[in-house]
Amino acid sequence: MKSKVIWRIAFAFFATAGIAWLYLHWKRTEPVRVIKAFVHAVERQDVDTIFRLTIPQEREKLGVTKKAIRSVLTATLWCRGPVVGNIRSVEIHGYYAIASGEWLRAGTKKPLPANYSPAFNPGVMVLVVSALGLTLEGWRVSTARFLVGRDFQTFGNLNLCRKIGIKGLVDVQTGRVIALSEMEHRLASLSRPTR
């Protein structure tokens, strides 16, 4: 009789520990799943999913609309034909995460060229996706930052983003809003034209 009680206690302990471990693993990998879903949505040109995965403040106050998403991506990334996002790394820092890599042509798997690029990766359309965990909807992506990056890497300025009404973006590290003019200055200092 005593051994049955011990087995039941041991089973309850290990079952609880296993469930706790699965829950913690799920919470730790949640930003990776959200970022991958965002990249896959860009690959499929799924504007509804991209919009749904956007930080609510960017959707509600900073001008990230379905029309804005479609306009910027059609003029920058999607005009090059089918693309594939090659995520090289995802860094998770508590409440925010940043994925990096590059965009490739779907057919050849060669990097997409960029007109303006960071000095560390010249001539390549970089993939940078920033996600924030402190939203009422859970982990969400700074779609405004993503669109700004595509606009700048293609044209060297943020005129397209201004034209379609994007007012700024949420900095996932600080939670504060960065105006387009400030972001353009930051990008210009990090990038150089590709010849």
Image: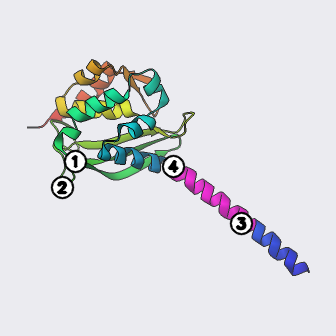
Q: Closer to the N terminus: mark 2 or mark 3?
A: 3
At x 24% / y 23%, what residue is drawn? 160
Q: In the image, is residue 128 part of the stretch drawn in magenta?
A: no
Specify the quadrant of the image occupied by residue 6. Answer: bottom right
The mark lying in front, picked from 2 and 4, is 2
Name of the residue lying farthest toward the left: 195
- Residue under pointer 1: 82
At x 66% / y 64%, what residue is drawn? 18
Amino acid type, label 2: Gly
At x 22% / y 47%, what residue is drawn? 82
Residue 194: x percent and y percent?
A: 12, 37
Find the distance from the CA under tag 4 to the CA under tag 1: 27 Å
- Residue under pointer 3: 15
Residue 168: x percent and y percent?
A: 37, 22
- Location of residue 120 with respect to 144 vertically, above or below: below
Asked whether disc 2 touches disc 1, contact meaning CB atoms under 8 Å apart, the reply is: yes
Estimate how packed mark 1 is, as few (under 14), some (14 to 19) or many (20 or more) residues with alpha carbons within 10 Å.
some
Q: Closer to the N terminus: mark 2 or mark 4?
A: 4
Q: Which residues are magenta?
A: 13-30
At x 33% / y 46%, what residue is drawn? 100
Amino acid type, label 1: Pro
- Residue under pointer 2: 107
- Residue under pointer 4: 30
- Location of residue 170 with respect to 26 vertically, above or below: above
Amino acid type, label 4: Glu
Left or right, 83 with reference to 176: left
